[in-house]
Amino acid sequence: MLVLAAEGGTNPLIGNLIWLAVMFAMLYFLMIRPQQKEQRERAEMIRALKPGDKILTNGGLIGVITKVDDLSIKIRVAERVEVEVIRTGVARKLKD
């Protein structure tokens, strides 16, 4: 590209725009797309929570879901101790 620009064959602005497009495409495929995929998987996990699932909250509590509402869930963290947590406060679902 630089050789052609030096000879006057093409405009150097076009070469710069091509490199900018290539860099944006790399950024999209290496950073943005994987993050969107992770967000979709997390949203699906939160939607699929049901009573009996063992979870870890963002605050570090480990418990078993006893009740699921639209915005919150109740988890049993100890014998006769239940805590209500916002659904988005669930970090991950644990294996039994």
Image: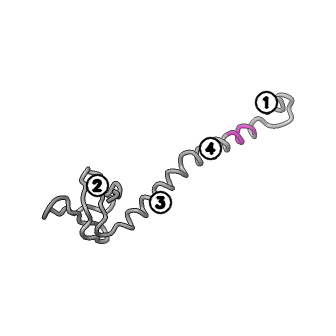
Q: Earlier in the sequence, mark 4 or mark 3?
A: 4
Give residue 77's position: percent from left, percent from top: 19, 59
Pointer 1 residue: 2
- Compared with 52, 10 (above or below) is above
- Residue 71 lies in quadrant: bottom left
Q: Earlier in the sequence, mark 1 or mark 3?
A: 1
Pointer 4 residue: 26
- Taking the view exactly as shown, the residue that stands out farthest to the front is 96
Q: Which residues are magenta?
A: 15-19
**Is residue 93 on the magenta stretch?**
no
Give residue 35's position: percent from left, percent from top: 49, 51
Pointer 2 residue: 57
Q: In this rendered view, identify the residue nearer to me: 6 or 63.
A: 63
Q: Earlier in the sequence, mark 3 or mark 2?
A: 3
What separation in Å lies between label 1 and label 3 (alpha carbons)?
43 Å
**Is residue 17 on the magenta stretch?**
yes
What separation in Å lies between label 2 and label 4 (alpha carbons)?
34 Å
Q: Earlier in the sequence, mark 2 or mark 1?
A: 1
Pointer 3 residue: 40
- Compared with 26, 46 (above or below) is below
Report the residue at 32% width, 57% height from top. 90
Q: Viewed as shown, does residue 11 lie left or right of 81? A: right
Give residue 57's position: percent from left, percent from top: 29, 55
Within-10-Å neighbours for mark 2: few <14, some 14–19, many 20+:
some
Q: Earlier in the sequence, mark 4 or mark 1?
A: 1
Name the element at disc 3.
helix
* C-beta proximity under 8 Å, tags 2 and 4: no
Name the element at disc 4.
helix
* C-beta proximity under 8 Å, tags 2 and 1: no
* C-beta proximity under 8 Å, tags 4 and 1: no
